[in-house]
Amino acid sequence: MKVLVTGASGFVGRHLLPALQRAYPDAVLIGTSGPSDPPRTSVDGYVALPLDLSSQHSINDVVDTVHPTHVVHLAGYASGAGTDAAGIAKINANGTEALLCALAGLSHPVTAVLASSGYVYGTTPEAPGADEDFPCNPSGAYAISKASMEDAAREMASEKLKIVVSRSFNHTGPLQTTQFVVPAFAQQLAQIERGELPPVVKVGNLDALRDFLPVTDVVDAYSKMLLLDTPFTVLNVSSGIGVSVRDLLDGLINISRVPVTVELDPSRLRASDVPCSVGNPAKAKQLLGWEPSGEIATMLSTTLAYWRCQ
């Protein structure tokens, strides 16, 4: 088993590589880093190759060098806040299609897990949320790029190139950047605790309902997806439970070491924000034998602990 993890230098990738090592101790694991990363030959001790998803030559070079039997494709734009629709589509949709073309050209079968997003559904029902047959209605450049990626993957899947699309809902934990809501809160609280900021947490929309998982749950699901043996599968990676952003903030404030107030910052509001994004995980539970942990409190405490050390 030779596993290529694109985007290995990113948040999820740095959690996934050791999880794969534990699950498949005899596997060869090779990661990639992005063109904007500092030059490197490894990520946390794992081999890393440079990959530019806007370049077919770069993609072909990585695939021809590694000859993977399995791929977890994480590289690309990961934030729903981006507004450069053409640039995001070039990487997330066109870049993924180019990667799949390169994989299809290998002489041996390949299984590829593609990280999509629960945001392809647009607004969903509350618990238990949208299942995989719920109509997709993406809003915003990021969600639209992921939906386009899925369309291309569906057309390219075969017995030789098996593709698993993971519609991953919100997930967080240590190492995630402050582009995302929980680390953004945690960083501010850690800075307030150190006296670096006044005791005011700046926030965006707190009423949005989101399906949150610890990143450890998500990498466990990705690891299990590598063993699926069907040409094309779509799976929600989610808990089926919605939690408001306000409740996440309250959970962090409750474990903070100092009293704070909360203040709306209009610059943190997103034009494409959906009021509810919750996914039904029943299919993933059935096919993978996977279970979300439900450890939201631990997710919050480990994230705050990480930012206290930064």
Image (spheres, helix red, strand yellow):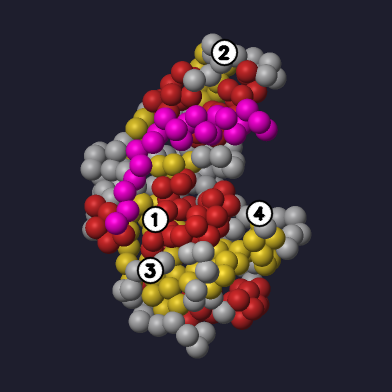
* 228 shown above or below 57: above
Residue at image location 54% in from the left, 11% down from the top: 259
User: What is the spatial separation of the Cα atoms under label 3 and label 2, in whole angstroms?
Assistant: 47 Å
* 106 shown above or below 28: below
Highlighted range, magenta: 289-310
**Amino acid type of the residue tagged 4 in the rendering:** Asp
Instruction: Tell me whether the residue at label 3 lies in contact with that at label 4, contact meaning CB atoms closer than 8 angstroms.
Output: no
Q: Secondary structure at mark 4?
A: loop
Q: Position of residue 295 (x, y in %)?
A: 39, 36
**Amino acid type of the residue tagged 2 in the rendering:** Val
The residue that disc 4 covers is 44
Q: Which quadrant: the C terminus?
A: top right
Residue 221 image label: 1
User: What is the spatial separation of the Cα atoms under label 4 and label 2, in whole angstroms?
Assistant: 34 Å
Q: Secondary structure at mark 3?
A: loop
Q: Earlier in the sequence, mark 1 or mark 4?
A: 4
Residue 227 image label: 3
Q: Position of residue 257 (x, y in %)?
A: 56, 15
Residue at image location 53% in from the left, 73% down from the top: 2
Q: Nearer the viewer, residue 110 or 200?
A: 110
> Tag 1: Cα neighbours inside 10 Å, few (<14), some, or many (≥20)?
many
Instruction: Tell me whether the residue at label 2 lies in contact with that at label 1, contact meaning CB atoms closer than 8 angstroms.
Output: no
Residue at image location 40% in from the left, 83% down from the top: 160
Does the magenta-highlighted stretch encompass residue 308?
Answer: yes
